[in-house]
Structure formats: structure tokens, C-alpha cells
Amino acid sequence: MSFLDLPQIIHDDRHIIHVDMDAFYASVEEQQHPHYRHKALVIAPDPRQHNGHGVITTANYKARQYGIGSAMPAIKAVEKIPAAQLQFTPPNFPLYRQISSQIHQIFNQVTDIWEPVALDEAYLDVTHNKLALDDEIRLALIIQRTIKRQLRLTCSVGVSYNKFLAKMASDYAKPFGRTVITSRQAQNFLAQMPISKFHGVGKALQQKLNQLGLHTGQDLQSVSVDFLTKKFGKTGFLLYQRAHGIDNQPVKAHRQNKSIGREQTFNRPIFNDQLTQQIFQQMSQQVAQTLQQKRLVGQTVVIKVRTVEFVTYTRRRTLEHFTNNAELIFQVSQQLFEELALQTQPLRLLGVTMTNLSEQNFEEIELF
């Protein structure tokens, strides 16, 4: 018997909740500016003031009724929404990050095993939880109501025995929805779903599946694992598993880095201002690269300087906005060093660190 012929075993002993904030950025803006609630709100710079440029980060549900969604050119909103109804506002990521942090604190009260996907969604493994409850549906309701009560924001929750189905469930009834998928219900639930609704299936793969006559979850369930793996390799095997309600990926416990830094000790003390500047620049680039690789941004730059007399100085500056930009980190580091006025002293150690870290969301990338 080959590996692909082995029976597919469903492990349904875990309790996973997927929390997805409803139109998060737009809802936060509506909370800050109540009059926005009566508008078709689009989170993007107004393209009429930027030569038609700009990309939509997200939109509220009124704007979505006009077919407006994230990653669309902002000019589409101008074309589709009546001017009297349309409201643009640029994204305020520091604010969204602050609210997201408060949501994460609520997760921490329930379980230590939670995995952020973006600022506005996360998976929680509540199989063993801090509230000592064995009712995952009640836990999901507690999370939903706590967010609503404390932050006056709504979220949709999906409850199931794996991450894939929990995500499918939270998408099923938005906004402020609650959907539960048990192991007995999974295949029937997935059978009725169009493939376009399967989390992780992009447009290119969807088109290839449609060309093979596969349009729904039921169509995927009707074909063999051999057929799908011959057509799509490993992706085909994963498709077969997902269509049958199988996903054994663990929820990766969130471990936030407290800081990321680089420092260098010199066997021979350095005197040269130009060399000092060069070292700060190199370390700033290394710190920025690590931040970018870990999809993190920081708000506070810290430098560390030690003289040959082993006197250690640390200086820090908190920026107005989060960043992982090497040039900005270097500029702030150099300013802090110049303020110390140690240029004439021999130095044994230099260091650059970024603290006050947060996750970087993909929408923060400059798109125009």
C-alpha cells in the first residue's frame, strides 16, 4: 500500500477558534469619527488628490455593497460610489496596532496558544485554556462579547477542530457571526462550498480546477487523491485533505520579540568618527533586515556605547511611527550618538537596538 492510499484520519480532539475582526480598520475609523458610519468608507488616500493613484487597504460594508474591496485601485471607488456617499481616509496604522494590542490582551486571558495572522485576525487553541472551560462555543462567545464590550468593535468567530475549518467558519457568517463546524458536519459543510471560498485557493488554482470540472467542495470530494496529486503534486494532496476536513497544522504559540539589536566589541578601541558612523550604519542595516525577515516593526531606537574606561551609555528615542527602515534607524542612532559628545573618546563597544516591537501587516507596504 502506498502512502497516498493510506486512509485519511480526522483528528478532532482539538478545539480551535478563529477570530476575525469585522472590517477592522474601517470600524476603528468609524469609532473615531462617528459620522463615517453613514458613508461608504474607503481606507485609502483620496486618489482625486494624488493624481488618481492609491490602493484600497479595506472598506466598510456600505462600500462593499458597491463591489469595493481591499487591494483594488482607489480610483475604482470614485467610479462606483456616488460622490455624496463616498468617504476616503488614509490608513492610521499606529492606531490600528494599538487597538490590535488590546485585542491580543483579551486572547492572553483565554489561552497562551494563539497565533496572529494579521492585526485583525488570529487562531486560538483553547483545548486547554486559562478559564478551565471545556465548552469551546462558550469560549468563543466570551471572546466575542468581551471585544464588543471593551472595545466597541465586532468580530466574527469560527469554531472547529482544525485551523482550516475554523477559518472557513468565521468567514461563513459575517459580520458579528458565530459558526461551529463539528467533525460530523465538516464534509457536508465543505461539499456545498464553491472552491473560490476555500481558504488558500487563489484565482490561478481555482481556474485550473474549474477547467477540470471541479467547482465545489463536493466535486473535490468526488475525485481520488491520486488524481489530484498527479495534477497538482503536493498542492493536490493538501486539496484532498482540506476537502475532507483534514488539517493537522498546529496553532503556533505567539512569542513576541521584545527587542532586536546588534552590538560589536572592539579589541582595538576606535577613535575615528567616520568609522563609528560606518559601524552604526552597518548595524542599522542588520537590525532592519532582521525586522523585515520577522515581519516586525519597531518604534524605539536604542544605542549603547562603552568607552575604554568601561563607562557604558545608553540613549533611546521613540519615533512617531513604527518602522523597519534601515536609513531611518541609522539617522536616529547617529543623532543619539552625536548628542553624547563622545567623539573624541576611544570606544570599546557600539550597539543599535529596536524595541517596542509589533507585527507588520502586509497592507502597510507602500503601494503608490
Image (tube, rainbow, N blue to C red):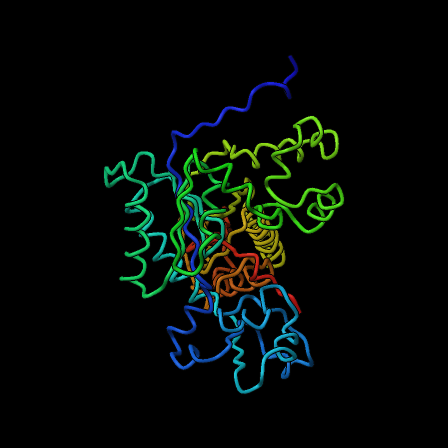
Please report the residue visible at 58 percent of the width from the left and 76 percent of the height from the top: 45
The number of numbered discs placed on residues in the rendered structure image is 0
Looking at the picture, how far across and down is residue 238, in whole percent? Answer: 61, 34
Location of residue 155 with respect to 53 vertically, above or below: above
Please report the residue visible at 27 percent of the width from the left and 36 percent of the height from the top: 134
Looking at the picture, how far across and down is residue 335, in whole percent? Answer: 51, 65
Please report the residue visible at 44 percent of the width from the left and 55 percent of the height from the top: 173
* Farthest left residue in view: 132
**Residue 257 visible to an observer of this rendering:** no
Residue 12 picture quarter:
top left
Q: Nearer the viewer, residue 156 or 216?
A: 216
Looking at the picture, how far across and down is residue 42, in whole percent? Answer: 54, 73
* Farthest top residue in view: 1
Residue 28 picture quarter:
bottom left
Q: Nearer the viewer, residue 337 or 140?
A: 140
Q: Quadrant of the C terminus?
A: bottom right
Q: Nearer the viewer, residue 285 or 114?
A: 114
Location of residue 83 with respect to 243 vertically, above or below: below
Please report the residue visible at 50 percent of the width from the left and 47 percent of the height from the top: 168
Looking at the picture, how far across and down is residue 339, in whole percent? Answer: 46, 66
Residue 36 picture quarter:
bottom left
Q: Quadrant of the N terminus?
A: top right
The answer to whether residue 304 is left or right of residue 42 is left
Location of residue 28 with respect to 182 vertically, above or below: below
**Residue 47 visible to an observer of this rendering:** yes
